[in-house]
C-alpha cells in the first residue's frame, strides 16, 4: 500500500547507493523533481535506466550519481548532445560511466517482460544492426513454432522506478494520461516505486485510455506541484523550451555545470526552492 509522504523522505527510504533506478516519462511527466532530490541526497554508484535519457540524466551523471547507463537514445531534444553524458563516457568525469545501448522497441520489450515476471523479452529487431556487436545482452533465439530468428533481451527489473503523474488519490492510486511511454511497465517491473504527482485528490476521475496504477504497486506518493518541469504535464503546464535551450551552454563546460548544480540544486532544500532560485537568477540576469 502506498505511503503518502514527502519526496525527501521517499528518496531517503527507497533509493540506496548501488541501486538500479529507472526514472521514466516520455516527452512529458519526466520526474525532474525526484532526480534533483537524488542529487541532493548524493546517491552514488547507481545504474540508471531510461529509454530516452535527457536533461535530468545529464544532471544526475554530471553530479556523480551514476556508474552505468542503460538506454535507447540520449540527447537534449531539439538542441543537441548531453555534454555531461559525453564527458563521463569519453573522459571518465566525474566518474567512469559504463553504457548499455538498446533500441526503443528492445527496452519496451524488456520492461514488459519485467512487468510480467518473465526472464526475457522477445521482439523482431536488431537484425542487421550493429548494436548486438556492442551489447552482449542482445541474443538471438529461434521461435519453436515458426523457426523465425528473434531478438531476446534480459527482463528489466529495477530496484526502484520513479515516475511523475498528474494525480493520486488519498489511498495512493495513481492516474496518468496523455502520452504514456513505459511508465506502467516500469512500475510493475520494479521492486520499489516512487511517484510524484501534481495533486492529491479525494477521487480519481479517469478519462478514457488513461492509466491507473493501483496503490498496492506503489511504495510512496509525494505531492510535488510542477515536478516535471521543464518537461510538461498534460492538462497542467507546457514544456519550457527555453530551459532546454539554456541547458546547452550551462552543461557544456564542467565549471558552469558545477556552479549551476551548486546554486540551484545543492543550494536549495526542495523542488520549490529550485524553481524559486531559477526565477531569482532570471530576474538578476
Image (spheres, grey):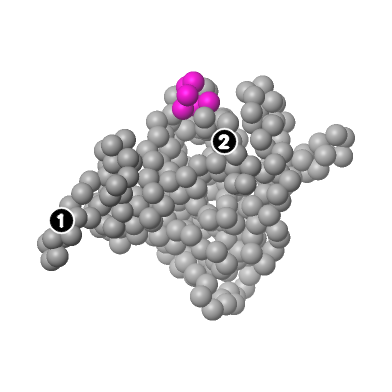
Task: Judge whether residue 204 can be spotted in this image.
Answer: yes
Location of the C terminus by quadrant is: top right
Find disc 1 in the rendering and name its residue: 142
How would you rate the neighbour count of disc 1 (Cα within 10 Å): few for under 14, some for 14-19, many for 20 or more?
Answer: few
* Magenta stretch, residue numbers: 87-92
Residue 274 in the image, given as x and y percentages of width and height: 71, 41
| Res 45 seen here | no
Residue nearest the viewer, comparing 127 with 45 = 127
Q: Is residue 234 magenta?
A: no
| Quarter of the image with the N terminus in it | bottom left
Q: Residue shown at 87%/35% (left/top)?
A: 284
Res. 247 image quadrant = top right
25, above or below 171, in the image: above
Please, what is the dominant secondary structure of the magenta stretch?
Answer: helix
Instruction: Identify the residue at image location x=63%, y=42%.
Output: 79
The residue under label 2 is: 82
Q: Looking at the image, is 86 positioned above or below residue 110?
A: above
Is 91 magenta? The answer is: yes
Horizontal and vertical percent for residue 212? Answer: 49, 70
In terms of secondary structure, where does tag 1 sit?
A: strand
Mark 1 to mark 2 CA distance (whole Å): 38 Å
Q: Residue at x 50, y 26 (%)?
A: 88
Residue 257 x %, y % = 65, 28
Name the secondary structure under disc 2: loop
- Give 209 or 8, whichever is nearer the viewer: 209
Label whose residue precedes the other's in the sequence (1 or 2): 2
Of 191 and 202, nearer the camera is 191
Point out which mark residue 10 bears. Answer: none
Q: How many marks?
A: 2
Q: Quadrant of residue 75?
A: top right
Please, which residue is most extreme toward the right here? 284
Mark 2 burial class by Cα count in 10 Å: few <14, some 14-19, many 20+: many
Amino acid at each position: 500500500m502506498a505511503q503518502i509522504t514527502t519526496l525527501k523522505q521517499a528518496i531517503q527510504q527507497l533509493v540506496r547507493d548501488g541501486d538500479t533506478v529507472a526514472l521514466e516519462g516520455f516527452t512529458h511527466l519526466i520526474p525532474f523533481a525526484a532526480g534533483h532530490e537524488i542529487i541532493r541526497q548524493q546517491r552514488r554508484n547507481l545504474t540508471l535506466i531510461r529509454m530516452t535519457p535527457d536533461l535530468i540524466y545529464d544532471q544526475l551523471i554530471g553530479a556523480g550519481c551514476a556508474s552505468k547507463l542503460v538506454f535507447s537514445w540520449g540527447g537534449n531534444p531539439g538542441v543537441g548532445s548531453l555534454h555531461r553524458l559525453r564527458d563521463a563516457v569519453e573522459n571518465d568525469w566525474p566518474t567512469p560511466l559504463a553504457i548499455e545501448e538498446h533500441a526503443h522497441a528492445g527496452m519496451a520489450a524488456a520492461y514488459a517482460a519485467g512487468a510480467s515476471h518473465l526472464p526475457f523479452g522477445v521482439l523482431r529487431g536488431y537484425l542487421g544492426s550493429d548494436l548486438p556487436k556492442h551489447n552482449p545482452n542482445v541474443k538471438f533465439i529461434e521461435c519453436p513454432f515458426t523457426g523465425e530468428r528473434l531478438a531476446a533481451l534480459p527482463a528489466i527489473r529495477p530496484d526502484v522506478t520513479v515516475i511523475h503523474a498528474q494525480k493520486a488519490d488519498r489511498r495512493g492510486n495513481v492516474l496518468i494520461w496523455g502520452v504514456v511511454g513505459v511508465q506502467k511497465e516500469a512500475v510493475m517491473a520494479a521492486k520499489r516505486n516512487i511517484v510524484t504527482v501534481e495533486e492529491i485528490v479525494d477521487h480519481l476521475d479517469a478519462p478514457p485510455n488513461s492509466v491507473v496504477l493501483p496503490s498496492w504497486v506503489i511504495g510512496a506518493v509525494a505531492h510535488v506541484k510542477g515536478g516535471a518541469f521543464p518537461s510538461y504535464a498534460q492538462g497542467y503546464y507546457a514544456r519550457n523550451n527555453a530551459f532546454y535551450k539554456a541547458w546547452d551552454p550551462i552543461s557544456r563546460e564542467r565549471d558552469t555545470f558545477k556552479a549551476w548544480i551548486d546554486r540551484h540544486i545543492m543550494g536549495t532544500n526542495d523542488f520549490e526552492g529550485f524553481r524559486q532560485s531559477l526565477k531569482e537568477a532570471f530576474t538578476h540576469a
